[in-house]
Amino acid sequence: MIERRSSSRITIKDVTSSGHAARLVLMSSYLYYWCDSPVLPDADYDYLCRFLARRWDKLKPLRQYMLGSAKDIQSTGHHVLISKAVEGGAQEWHKAIRGNYPRARIPSWKWNRRFGLHLAPLV
């Protein structure tokens, strides 16, 4: 794997599981597309998306649902669904890197009965 240090304090080499990569992609998508304040370099984000597409069958059904499809996540993350846990994790990650919380918050959530949690689209 590629080893690269960035301002995100994560190296791509640190990401060994599909679940970890999925969490990073979801949080990064929220910070980039919703808050307009990315913390992960584009090259690292793209690498993680390709990593997920190759290991799609190893993801739990909830993560697959949130990420869309292997084909979709391979090209962009603007279509993903965000949970309140993802939003909270992304807010804390942003604070750890930038020293402050991003101002943007998702204003409207929809209950998903299948998975039993609130989800929101980024677009």
Image (cartoon, helix red, strand yellow):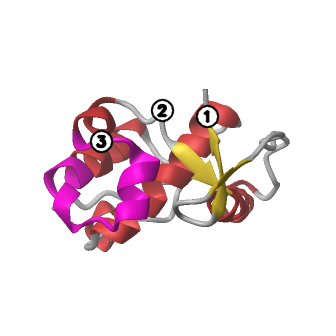
**Disc 2: which residue:** 79
Total labels: the figure holds 3
Secondary element under disc 3, as helix, strand or loop, is loop
Q: Position of residue 36 (x, y in %)?
A: 67, 32
**Disc 1: which residue:** 122
- Asked if disc 1 and disc 3 are in contact, CB closer than 8 Å, the reply is no
Is 14 in the magenta?
A: no
Can the viewer see residue 38 in this picture? no
Report the magenta residues as a range.
51-70
Report the quarter where the N terminus lies.
Answer: bottom left
Report the quarter where the C terminus lies.
Answer: top right
Disc 2 packing (10 Å; few <14; some 14–19; many ≥20): some
Secondary element under disc 2, as helix, strand or loop, is loop
- State the separation of the CA atoms marked 1 and 2: 6 Å
In this view, 42 is above or below 40? above
Q: Residue at x 46, y 50 (%)?
A: 66
Q: Residue at x 39, y 69 (%)?
A: 20
Secondary element under disc 1, as helix, strand or loop, is loop
- State the separation of the CA atoms marked 2 and 3: 10 Å
Mark 1 vs mark 2: which is more N-terminal?
Answer: 2
**Disc 3: which residue:** 69
- Asked if disc 1 and disc 2 are in contact, CB closer than 8 Å, the reply is yes
Q: Position of residue 111 (x, y in %)?
A: 69, 53
Disc 3 packing (10 Å; few <14; some 14–19; many ≥20): some
Please, what is the three-letter code of the amino acid marked with disc 3?
Ser
Please, what is the three-letter code of the amino acid marked with disc 1?
Leu
